[in-house]
Amino acid sequence: MILAADPLLVDGIDLTVALIVLLKAGVAFAMLLVSVMLVIWFERKLISDMQNRIGPAMAGPWGILQTLADGIKLFFKEDLLPTRADRVVFRLAPYLSIIPAFVAFAIIPVGGDFTNGGDGTVSMFGRSTLLQVADPPVGVLFFLALSSIAVYGVMLAGWSSGSKYPLLGSVRASAQMISYEAALGLAIATVFLTSGSLSTHEIVVGQSATTWNVLATGIVPFGIFLIAGTAELNRPPFDLVEAEQELVGGFHTEYSSIRFALFFLSEFMNMITMSAIAVTLFLGGPAGPIVTQRLAWVWPLFWFFLKVMAFLFTFVWLRATLPRFRYDQLMDLGWKVLIPAALGWFLLIATLDTARDLGWPTLPVVVVGVLALWGGAALLSGAVRKARAERLEEAEAHRDERADSTVGHGEA
Amino acid sequence: MEVAVFTLGAVIVLSGGLGVLLARNPVHAALFLVQTLFGVAVLFVLLEATFLAAVQVMVYAGAIVILFLFVIMLLGVDRADDLGIEPIAGQRPMAAVVGVSLAGLLATVLLVAVDGLTGARGGTPLGDAGDNTRRLGEALFTDMVFAVELTAILLTVAVVGAVALARRLSGPMQPLPVVAIAESDDQPTEADDEPAGATGEDS
């Protein structure tokens, strides 16, 4: 069928192969759970440092077992089901959140030697295989598909609670996630263009042969990916979904006990996966110098870990630094800045690619391309400014009519 | 193996389809629709059309049904609707006629097709599965390029039309948040309009 990309699966499937696949899946599953535990601790500890607090300190050395303690406590809490909840959907929603979060990590290459033309295979029990659970030919599209499934978890959780704050939270969340998925997808499309493949493994191999995609695509898509990714994760400064000053707890207000824990887990799992995807797409995945020949297989894992940690740190850092966006600002940024920017950059890269294929001189193509983009941007910003001025005028007239009765109307 | 996967996919699709018809709650119906679309994606994978499978989930399950749900939630029709009223006169008899003729058409196609079955693979194979994204892209942007461009124009027209309609119908006097608009442009505004302290850091 479609599994042929991994050298492990090319020569038919026997027991050893099946066991290796199971082992990889099991290890990925366990590692993901453990790392979620550590990431929650990491985030709490780091943000405490940034806020001049101590943070969790009692459970285990440096409070490292705090998450475990919290998890056990959550397990034994009463599981509440609101009277007005839609019972089936209410129970289903957490799983729609957690399963995509787990599965998405399957396509991440976490290790393997990519230096000196290496193709990242490692040998395991006499078979050569890739250090990733699956390498589907549609690769990153698989991740995008799963992240669009994950929207359901949030949306249905809010709706099925039969309560207004969760509903508001979930409507916000789904609108936000859909809006930023477009920008995210366009940023990723630029990577497809430079790498010429959708498969995560091929993308990593391509980057080790030339330069990392963060440079090859010209930094802009990377920035867009980072911003859109943060919004997709509903993390600060885009955490309107659970803006606690407005919505109590957002979409999971009515959830308790283990169901709440599932949402919590999937949130952090998504954060790890998003970091790992960013590393894979833009920063060469596990690529990095092999420093010692003994235990050489550890180094790619180490570089991968280091890069992912850098992203996790950035996410926490953003949370500690930036105030939350207002809803209209969020939508403005998504639709009027990120999507046009990503689209424009995509066109520019495509033009350069075509020009290279046709042997056109680079400089005039770049100049014309940039000029065309600049013209488009000017048109767009002009339209936005005009629309805003008109809305302002209308609202002004409206306010004059109703005197000061509209003051105090906040966002919806 | 193929038969097993096909059976699984077919069961998912058909039970989802029945669910859409039988569910009393529109949100449940939408969820069954997602199930159906997912089943179709499974069938696509079985046909080695992996790109179509991914796009099926992304576009239909990920965007279109989400929009359905949005409308259902925002319009608050999530409780049972009154089925006594017929919004368009003669809708139901028409639906029956169309339904029966569609069933007849499908049955005819099936009967004709069974006659001609050879068991051989139809069409040219698309190379290995990793290649079919490239093949699809090539087909779309060479042989089919006019159809693609026309569809693109159609969609653009639809979007612009929707925006224009929404703007017209909503009336000139929306109680827009004056504060919000003025501030997002960094223009100075009245001091008394400042939003109530939206600060504070969660633990």
Image (cartoon, grey):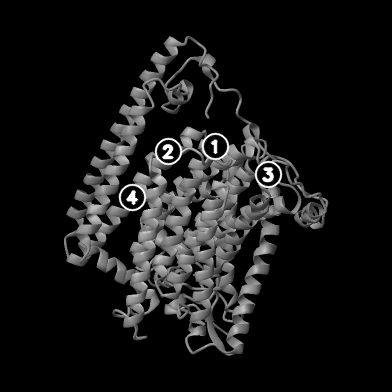
Residue with the mark numbered 4: A343
Numbered disc 1: secondary structure: loop
Numbered disc 3: secondary structure: loop
Residue B23 image position (x, y, % from top left) = 57, 52
Q: Is residue A240 visible?
A: yes
Is A121 above or below relative to B44?
A: below
Between marks 1 and 2 in the image, the one whose residue lies nearer the viewer: 2
Residue type, label 2: Pro
From the viewer's side, name the closer residue of A225 and A134: A134
* Badge 1 vs badge 3, beta-carbon distance below 8 Å: no
Q: Residues within 10 Å of mark 1 (few under 14, many from 20)?
A: few
Q: Residues within 10 Å of mark 2 (few under 14, many from 20)?
A: few
Do the residues at pointers 1 and 2 share their chain? Answer: yes
Residue type, label 4: Leu
Between marks 3 and 4 in the image, the one whose residue lies nearer the viewer: 3
Between marks 4 and 2 in the image, the one whose residue lies nearer the viewer: 2
Between marks 3 and 2 in the image, the one whose residue lies nearer the viewer: 2
Numbered disc 2: secondary structure: loop
Residue with the mark numbered 2: B87
Of all chains, the one bearing label 2 is B
Q: How much space separates mark 3 and mark 4, taking CA atoms?
A: 41 Å
Of all chains, the one bearing label 4 is A
Res B182 → quadrant: top left
Residue with the mark numbered 1: B76
Is A26 above or below relative to B190?
A: below
Of all chains, the one bearing label 3 is A
> In screen coordinates, is B125 left or right of A161?
left
Residue with the mark numbered 3: A85
Q: Earlier in the sequence, mark 3 or mark 4?
A: 3
> Which residue is drawn at the image coordinates 60% and 84% (left, top)?
A18
> In screen coordinates, is A180 left or right of B167?
right
Q: Is residue A125 visible?
A: no
